[in-house]
Image: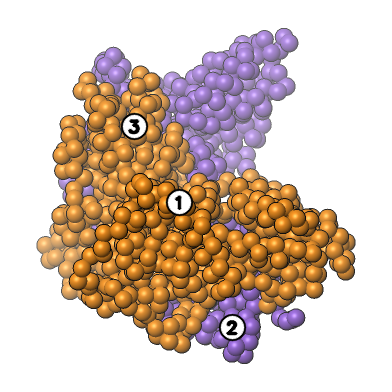
Chain colours: A purple, B orange
Amino acid sequence: MSETQPVKILICAMGGEGGGVLMNWIVNAAWAKGYPVQATSVPGVAQRTGATTYYIEMLPEAIAPGAPEPIFALIPTAGEVDVLVATEAAEAARAAGNGLITPDRTHLIASTSRVLLMPEKMAMEDGRLDNDKLAAILDKSAQKSVLFDANQAAQEAGAIVNAVMLGAVAATGVIGIELDDFIAAIKQEGKAVSSNIAGLNKGFALAKGEAEEAPEADNVVSLSEQRAKNDFPENVQPILQHALRRLNNYQNTAYAENYLARLENFKDSDPELLVSVAKQLALRMSYEDIIRVAQVKVRAERFERIKGEAKAAPEDVLIVTDFFKPGIAEISDMLPTGLAKSLIAWGEKNGKMEFYGIGMEVKTTTITGFLKLWFLAKLKWWRPHSHRWQVEQANIDDWLDMVDSAATLNANFAAEIAELARLVKGYGSTHRRGLRNFSRIVEEYVRPVLTAGSVPSDATEKLRDIRDAATKDPEGSALGELLAKIGSPGTLAAE
Amino acid sequence: MERSFHKEIEQLRQGDNGKFQGEGILAVTKALLQSGVGYVGGYQGAPVSHLLDVLVQAKDLMGELGVHVEANSNEASAAAMLGASINYPIRGAVTWKSIVGTNVASDALSNLASPGVKGGAMIVSGEDTGEGASVIQERTHAFAMKSSMWLLDPRPNLQSMVDMVENGFQLSEVSNTPVILALRIRACHVQGDFTTKNNKKSPINTIDKLDDPAAFEYDRLAHPPATYAQEKKKVEERLPAAQKFIVDRELNEFFDGRFNNLGIILQGGLYNTLVNRLNILGLGDQLGNSDIPLMVLNVTHPLAPEQITDFCAGKDGVLVMEEGNPEFIEHQVHTLLRKADIQTKIFGKDVFPTSGEYNAEAVTNALVDFLGDVEPLAIDLEALRNKAAKLLNDKASGQEIMDIALPPRPPGFCTGCPERPVFTALKMLREEIGDIHVAADIGCHAFATYAPFSMGNSILGYGMGLASASAVGPMLKKRTISIMGDGGFWHNGLQTGVLSNLFNEGDGVLIIMQNGYASATGQQYIPSSTAGSDTTPMTSEIEQTLKALGVKWLRTVRTYGVSRMLETLREAMTTEQKGLKVIIADSECMLARQRRIKGENAEKLKRGAEVTIPRFGVDEEICTGDHSCIRLSGCPSLSIKDNSDPLRDEPVTQVIESCVGCGLCGEIAHAAQLCPSFYQAERVQNGGALTKMMAGVRSSVIGWLAGSERPQ
């Protein structure tokens, strides 16, 4: 019976990444060397963005003509994979979970980049998988591993990720096929030869440790406000610097001063409470309105950034179109209180609050388009005269009072009330939904606790659960269920 | 078409002693030409699409060989094509996807199998079971048995599959019976090689035509009283002829092993998996030498009784390795042995899983259980169990280190897919008027059953969406919405759905996704395809067809116009007008469009013409991290990233590299009144002098004004 065992290679990829081409490169290179090889796949409809696998078995030595060829398996088996190539970190982890990467034999070549799964992206807050946990799984699973951001490498090389992975396979030297063999296979295939070879070389160099990944640039905040520095503790300084800069830009220096004044009450509080209030207060004070949107949209840096995204060369022309659809709420926001209230009343009576709006597509790279936004941005002086301003400032003060009175009872609970403000964000229906949830939680849970004058030991945890429930689904059904289950805090304390 | 087969066509031309290297299904295609087929037809579907795709593209070669090729409108029309072999000694082959295609074809197949064939007739069926399968899991075996057609299941290497095509035609001819070549998905996609032979011309072909049609023979009609005699012939003449040919030509293979008291009878398609497991367990090697004698059924129906009894006689135990449910072969083996009074113990579904793919784990467990029970010679069971345990242990430790819940990654709509916006509008409609019964269908649009849309109450078959809601509508206060692709419309939906609805004065809403191709299977042309040329369809227009059928309420809406689509849907759901309401959701398949545009743009750039490439972006500072846009879109190019704002924790939306600028993000921002963070950036290359001058003036004015808006 023959001694040399086949090398077994499993490629885990997603539809559209060229996993099949990667498989063919390896097969063609093996054929060129006279190695018996077999490869197969189950792409089907998975080729449309889904996870899919390609499986290769190969005898890493040429056999005499006419000699019997090995009989290769068509299905990968747990504990029997020599090389696992994964173009994405979660797919690599999936393979590890299925036992297809094992410490006794598997050489893992995986990209650390993520293509997020739908549930991760759909979550109303952060539903992403824990990267550290993914890394730990990959660390534990393989005999040897080469982990690098193949997606970034591909972008830098101007190639598709499959060529980069091929380079990394060559670098490991475990399948008896060299870099030059793969170059020949790419040339033989004859498609996008130069970019594929660039990707191949990049992957080879990265896997050999010859190229360094570019370190991420640090965002250094240099601005400082003397008063903030003198009066507030160290841990909150970075937030304050950022908040002051933001509010100054949003409105003016006086408004930024007002922020510090509002925060004054909390400067000697529990450090975590102070951080929560400082963050949320800055966000609430720079609430989203159409002026703020215009301010962001007309910045010079923005156009530079977009040019980069569109990969526009200096001689190319860039056209930017922005999409706005201010509804009744956004328009009434800007009016003086009296007018605004009549407009809102009309809108609510006629059911126009949810679905009525004026769709605008503004070509911001034309002079007229740009001026529309520029003038809007210049309107920030008017903000304090608007209905929205009155409402927001009153709401902020209410909320701060609530946090303040809670702080005398329990600092953690107070911080949780401060964090509750996270629900109020955005524009249009997102904003209305957030505000509705916020008010509901305040009325049904927070106020009863504060009125009772003592904070039950599990109240902080409960309030956090309630806030999480509010972001479970847009319909608010999880929130409704939880509030109903918890009942009023008074009755609970009595139980 | 999604793929060009230029290189593969060259391989199809190879003659004697050439070396074919490539995919299994293309090797089968080459084998058809080597066998001298006169005609080939079929309907696309994984894993056999390439067979037809390559022949459709190989017009010249088909012309030289006089082969008639049809891309049929469905599997029934493909199966009926085999009718040519009833009266004429012409070999023909048709292909389709597994049981679902056979179901559609079954009327013609039964009426073909009854009179039988003169010329070899072969159906190449792409079996789609196990991992990665996209359809219901049933066995083709049942069809072969009930219609008395022979079922070929060759070992999954190119040479065996190719040989079986040639043998299959001969088998078909000696027994006057159509044959089915069943190839599992991994066998269709397997890359390998085989030694080629010259292509053969059919004795009757499109060049060397017959002077006269076949003479009238009543016996060749599937019509009484001939059908009674035909049924008798199936059993008394064709079956024995087939069994004799199978034995004489040694279509089934026997491999000796030193444990003579044992045996394994297996379907040919499972051979590689079994050999691999025997090797790992120390009961064989990778060259196919086995300690246990093997009987490989390359023909799984009919069985040759004396082969079964000869193999089993004198053995203590025989394992029948038969994938799928029910276990037809195992039942037959039992019957044959009982009748021959052979007492060998038979193992099968008692040690194998009753359903699902026979993967390494299933086969390992079955072998251990089988060997543990028959107490064979000279096997150290303890050592065997230890070797088998490694696989299970590796699996278990994999599960152990997997300490996070990893959601599956099902397929979905491509970036910029024109079908996605329709479901965005449907999701918004649902928020307005409450839940709606959605009758889903087969096609890319079935991806809407996954998140973020999670829509669809039933899937009943290709083109059956509308028909499947016909008894639901009358029971519900709200109208139902049925989905159909243009592929499904022409395949079946036109008559099964639309005509039946009209004839029965049905109500309800039908959305037809008109993207111009059978997209899910590789963008094959369909009758309403415009073949890249302006707007003239190749054969028929859906809108005109519907009007001619008598549809009164008919709207054609560009899919990307979400607001307009929402309005149209709202109207269709609420109008007083009775009768079927059809919305044609019209926009070209984005995958096909991008492929086309890429070439066109490259050519334009070469000659210095203006090229505009759009993509979308998100202003991070404006995005509030609520991800409503993702819940309404689900586009692969729409993702999230860390918020660079130190005051915020929730990740913000981002548009990644792969964006093709379809415009849906802007439409959603408008239609659903989401945040104004989206923008479209168009890069204009080779802009004209005026464009450039205007851009220059604009950027200096804007630059000057924008300078004042720098954050301090």
Measuring 46% from the left and 56% from the top, which residue is drawn there?
Answer: B233
Same chain under badges 2 and 3? The reply is no
Residue B202 showing in the rendered view: yes
Chain for numbered disc 2: A
Where residue B190 appears, as percent x and y from the top left, is 52, 69
Separation (CA) of disc 3 from disc 1: 45 Å
Chain for numbered disc 3: B
Query: Residue B278, located in which quarter of the rendered image?
Result: bottom right
CA neighbours of label 3 inside 10 A, class few (<14), some (14 to 19), many (20+): many
Q: Nearer the viewer, mark 3 or mark 1?
A: 1
Measuring 25% from the left and 36% from the top, which residue is drawn there?
Answer: B499
Dot 1: element: helix
User: Residue extending furthest bottom?
Assistant: A64
Disc 1 target residue: B231
Disc 2 target residue: A35
Dot 2: element: loop
Where residue A429 appears, as percent x and y from the top left, is 38, 29
Q: Is residue A83 above or below residue B691?
A: below
Q: Which mark is residue B481?
A: 3
